[in-house]
Image (cartoon, rainbow, N blue to C red):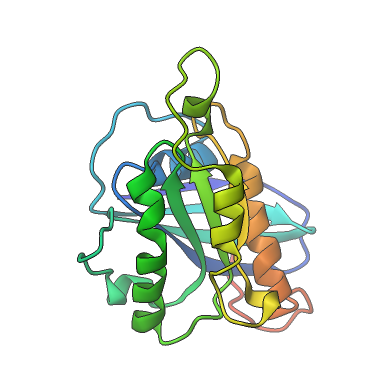
Amino acid sequence: MEYSTISSSNSIHNFQRKIALIGARNVGKTTLTVRFVESRFVESYYPTIENEFTRIISYKNHDCTLEILDTAGQDEVSLLSTKSLMGVRGIILCYSIVNRASFDVIPILWDKLVDQLGKDNLPVILVGTKVDLGRGTKCEKRCVTKTEGEKLASTIGSQDKRNQAMFIECSAEQDYNVEELFMLLLKQMERVEGTLGFDGENNNKCNVM
């Protein structure tokens, strides 16, 4: 299923990037994506096979088309779709702060991703989801601390510190740090890639549809 939304801007150059959300089952990959693309919260859980979303956003006065791949839930033995990952330029690794197993599997998922793509220098953000469940009246027991998330992020990526994963926590239900998550990945991509096509080169340029 494909979704699309457009945010207008007075941009000079257009560019596009394909990114992928990867994580265990029921960590909120789809709810994060739908919140970002459609500004709404999906309350029910339906196991994702694979979805693609599109949103055009303004980034530093440029139109950026984000092609967002929402992958199926992963575990230690399931395989990522190599075909779907073709062209991916940035990764969001997701775990739930109230699900320890989803956190513990992250290094395995990262290693699988590196093996399949043949490189470890992709821009990557590690995100702890569902922070709303770890506080307030509907509080569940937080199983993963923020410090643990930050420590794990420091071990993901290539040995070049420029390519080290960045870390953030968010909540799709409360719309907390969702926009910031995707903007942080764009900033990470800019840091790793350089100009992101801002200099007018034909670097994955696209037309706004």
**Quarter of image, res 206:** bottom right
Q: Does residue 173 sit above or below 168 in this rendering?
A: above
x and y percent of residue 43 in the render?
36, 26
On the question of residue 28 being in view, the answer is yes
> Relative to 152, is 114 on the left or the right?
left
Q: Does residue 139 sit above or below 114 in this rendering?
A: above
x and y percent of residue 10 in the render?
78, 54
Query: Which residue is more in the foreground, 63 or 125?
Result: 125
> Relative to 149, is 99 on the left or the right?
left
Q: Does residue 28 sit above or below 20 in this rendering?
A: above
> Relative to 143, is 78 on the left or the right?
left
Q: At x 39% / y 75%, what residue is drawn?
A: 111
Query: Which residue is more in the foreground, 158 or 190?
Result: 158
Q: At x 50% / y 37%, what residue is drawn?
A: 35
x and y percent of residue 40 in the render?
48, 30
**Quarter of image, res 110:** bottom left
Query: Which residue is more in the foreground, 158 or 29?
Result: 158
Q: At x 28% / y 58%, what residue is drawn?
A: 74
On the question of residue 208 being in view, the answer is no
x and y percent of residue 140 in the render?
42, 24
Considering every residue shown, the one lying at the far left of the view is 77
Query: Which residue is more in the foreground, 77 or 21?
Result: 77
